[in-house]
Amino acid sequence: MEDLELNKSFWKGRSVFLTGHTGFKGGWLALWLASMGARVHGYSLAPPARPALFSELHLDECLESSAIADIRDLQILKRELGKASPSVIFHLAAQPLVRKAYQSPVDTFSTNVLGSVNLFVAALQSGSVEAVVNVTSDKCYQNIGRNSFFVEEDPLGGDDPYSASKACSEIVTASYWHSFFRGSGIGLATGRAGNVIGGGDWAQDRLIPDFLRALDSQQPLRVRSPNAIRPWQHVLEPLAGYLLVAEKACRDAERWSGAWNFGPSANDTKPVSWIVDFLTTAIPNEGWEVETDEQPNEAGLLKLNSSKAKSMLNWTSRWSIEDALTKTVEWHQAWKSGTPAQDISLRQIEEYLSR
């Protein structure tokens, strides 16, 4: 496979405003951008977990600035974005957990919907922004359990609060594009990724972090939906897509704006039980069991069609699900043995680029 067609020189010295930089995906993206010479300005709530990828990567030493603030506070957001004077904005700040959304629906909707509105308002007033990429979710589609792959033109929707909030964010993005961004010279795109995995994710209620916690504590893993089918992928896969579409949108806003799926290959859309069986076979552990408590409603089947990104961006999934799981476990074990997280992550970025 040829090297990924990322133009590193495009990012060198470029000012980038990254919301959600203290999170899992945001931390990886911040490090990747900084490694290419971008001047990264972060805006996010404090790290949500302990340990935190933000701290483990020593991102405070890599970034131009790091504002700990709420995306719902428009005045602070406008102030920080104005100071950064960015060319590109990546919007990853969100409430990202399905089960937490049931517990805190107001916070979920206000963060994921109003937060997007605030960001667009600030971007339009900045005078410097050339492109905005709003990272939403594969769960933004109206999912009725059909056995087919979602394409970007499929209807949006969501029965659970998290999915609905991401569908709303997509609708808001389309509205702002047609009402305010179109013709302004500023690109506005959304990125819809699959179930991302990778080293440094310590969030609650996610399968791989839950497995690694069970492994470290020598306890059986409790699995809530073993038959649920999801599009699994390493975190670097969608991040590469976001970088590509941002670069393109800076050069031609009209052509490259809109929605983009960045999902794994069809073979890597697997049930939860397959993922757990792969991990428990590869690593000595205490096994797994099905969680018997009543669970909130979640879609049982979800698949993404990424043909648009493949044909237009020359983006394609580079690591199989087996590769992604292996790299995730390698990262965790190296970190546990004392290898600096930044060293492990930069090495895996280089491995991914040269695959």
Image (tube, grey):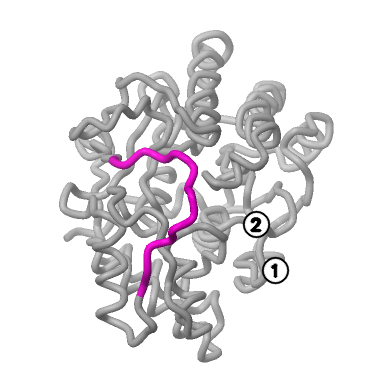
Q: Mark 2 points at which residue?
A: 22
Between 215 and 242, the residue placed more toward the observer is: 215
* Quadrant showing the N terminus: bottom left
Left or right relative to 106: residue 290: left
- Give the amino acid at mark 2: Thr
- Give the residue drawn at x 31%, y 54%: 232
Taking 152 as reference, is 280 above or below it?
below
**Residue 14 x/y as whole percent:** 58, 47
Residue 296 within the segment the image draws in magenta = yes
Determine crowd level at label 2: few under 14, some 14-19, many 20+ residues with C-alpha closer than 10 A: many
Can you tell which quarter of the image residue 114 is in? top right
Q: Position of residue 284 (x, y in %)?
A: 33, 87
Is residue 15 at least partly visible in the picture? no
Report the residue at 22% width, 54% height from top: 268
Q: Is residue 136 above or below residue 55?
A: above
Q: Tell me the tag on residue 247.
A: none
Decide: few, some or many residues near mark 1? Use Cα within 10 Å; few <14, some 14-19, many ≥20: few
* Quarter of the rendering occupied by the C terminus: bottom left
Residue shown at the point (43%, 61%) measured from the top left: 291
Q: Is 259 situated left or right of 110 in this image? A: left
Would residue 243 be seen by someone viewing this image from the given angle?
yes
Magenta residues (range): 288-301
Q: Which of 80 and 324 is in front in this view?
A: 324
- Secondary element under disc 1, as helix, strand or loop, is helix
Which residue is denoted by mark 1 in the rendering?
A: 61
Residue 73 left/right relative to 216? right
Tell me the element at label 2: loop
Of all residues, the one furthest to the bottom in this rendering is 337
